[in-house]
Image (cartoon, rainbow, N blue to C red):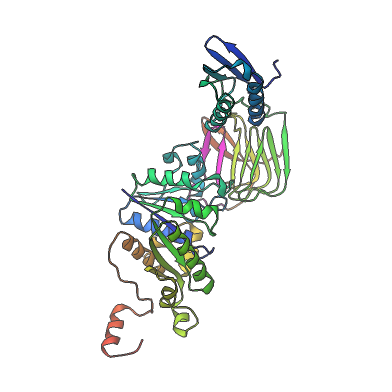
Amino acid sequence: MGEVIVITSGKGGVGKTTTSANVGTALSLIGKKVVLIDTDIGLRNLDVVLGLENRIVYDVVDVVEKKCRPNQAMIKDKRFDGLYLIPAAQTRDKNAVTPEQMRELCDSLKNEFDYVIIDCPAGIEQGFKNAISGASKALVVTTPEVSAVRDADRIIGLLEANEIRDIKLIVNRLRVDMVKKGDMMNVDDILDILAVGLIGVVPDDEDIITSTNRGEPAVTNEKSKAGAAYRNIAKRITGEDVPIMDLSGDNAFVAAIKKIFGVKQ
Amino acid sequence: MLNESVVLKGKKDGVSVILSPDMPFSIIMSDVIEKFNQSKSFFSSGAYNINFSGRSLSQDERLQLEKNVSEILSECEISIGYQELESSPKKIFKDIKEGYTKFHEGTIRSGQLLESEGNLVVIGDVNPGSEIVAAGNIVVMGAVRGIVHAGCTGNRDAFIVALNLSPTQIRIADIITRPPDNDVRHEIIPERAYIKDNTIYIDEFLYPIK
């Protein structure tokens, strides 16, 4: 029996879709069978980020309206076995789907897949309600900004009200140089407010922009720091114990030596 | 009588309801309610078979019919059946040489869907994330970057012409194709897409200079 995980944030532009694409791809890279569902009906993006836009024939609305079978709407990824996408409809709106229909779809998919990952739209209206209805776990994405953290807090409250207890936090787009100077909230400040478990910290990385534009998730790029962070998040989702990456720029060996000699980082 | 949207006929084993295939379902629905209300006195309490025929109905439409009819005839025991239309597929649009044509001026943007029951001429661009669908030919005086579907009711002779044909996907009748993944285009020329041997071909479309 698979797990249904919703990736949400409340605020727009913090990286829900990027996170969905990368976590999904990373899970498939470690041999899991994954289906991604884009629930941002009318403003779909996940297909573009994965480079699968031109393969769409049926979408999630067609599935819930029973115009096609779920398997017909699933697009198999062109690079990775075991990764599938059910795209959102673009010419419809959020009201084309109900929470009950989404729950039914998720329930049928989790028999077949290890992970069903739901990319949630921004906001707390119909689209959000649809996205969370079938989920048993949530990954909340936030950036180190007061506004994004405020919205994440609101979202966590709503998730708890909807009986989703397993909530983990991803801090996205962290800039270590700014944190060091005290110009940006650090991870501890954020955890202090939100009081949920941290599952990963993703550094701000220019590679994300190029990889998004090219339709190739950053996790496939060995050199990308953000990609490495997403690979670690995927491992933690599977239950593996991976320490949170040290983002200070020093490698672990140098850091260990500095520690021995009592050099302050 | 032929112009009526709903016809009720008493039969030995129940009632046959013939629905018009041409009228919108909302009208049919209200006429069904009206007809059953009018002939309510005919139905004493008892069991009846009610058989709908004449048009194909979606699951949702069937549920609506069942709900309304059973509300009106709440005194009776009813069982509802449907007779599927044998030749239900839509008529294939054939007037691609001369016939109904929709002209659209302006850009079709992401999330927009432009449909035509006949041919379609777009004076403007068709952006990624949008969709244009026509039963006949499609001509775009601009760039096609979204999904374009010609001959959607099944006419495989329909074609697509555009000044810049770089779509996300091309569909003609029941055939779907997409550009190759690493499609790098160097020059932009008018092109025409058509079906030959069950495959969509794209040729450059230049007016022959003699």
Residue A153 sits above or below residue B96 on the image: below
Residue at screen point 56% across, 25% down:
B56
In this rendering, would B162 be left or right of B182? right
Residue A202 sits above or below residue A165 on the image: below
Residue B130: image location, x then y, percent:
61, 47
Residue at screen point 31% across, 82% down:
A255
In this rendering, would B109 be left or right of A175? right
* Residue lying furthest top: B12
Residue A213: image location, x then y, percent:
51, 60
Residue A198 sits above or below residue B146 on the image: below
Residue A225 sits above or below residue A158 on the image: below
Q: Is residue A51 visible?
A: no
Residue A230: image location, x then y, percent:
38, 64
* Residue lying furthest left: A260
Q: Quadrant of residue B42?
A: top right
Q: Quadrant of residue B58?
A: top right
Towards the viewer: B16 or A213: B16
Towards the viewer: B134 or B112: B112
Which quadrant is the C terminus of chain B positioned in? Answer: top right
Residue B25 is covered by the magenta coloring: no
For the record, the magenta segment spans B168-185
Residue at screen point 51% across, 67% down:
A151
Residue A101: image location, x then y, percent:
47, 43
In this rendering, would A152 be left or right of A198? right
Towards the viewer: A54 or A202: A202
| Predominant SS of the magenta segment | loop
* Residue lying furthest bottom: A262
Residue at screen point 38% across, 54% down:
A136
Q: Is residue A175 visible?
A: yes
Which quadrant is the N terminus of chain B positioned in? Answer: top right
Towards the viewer: A250 or A229: A229
Circle count: 0
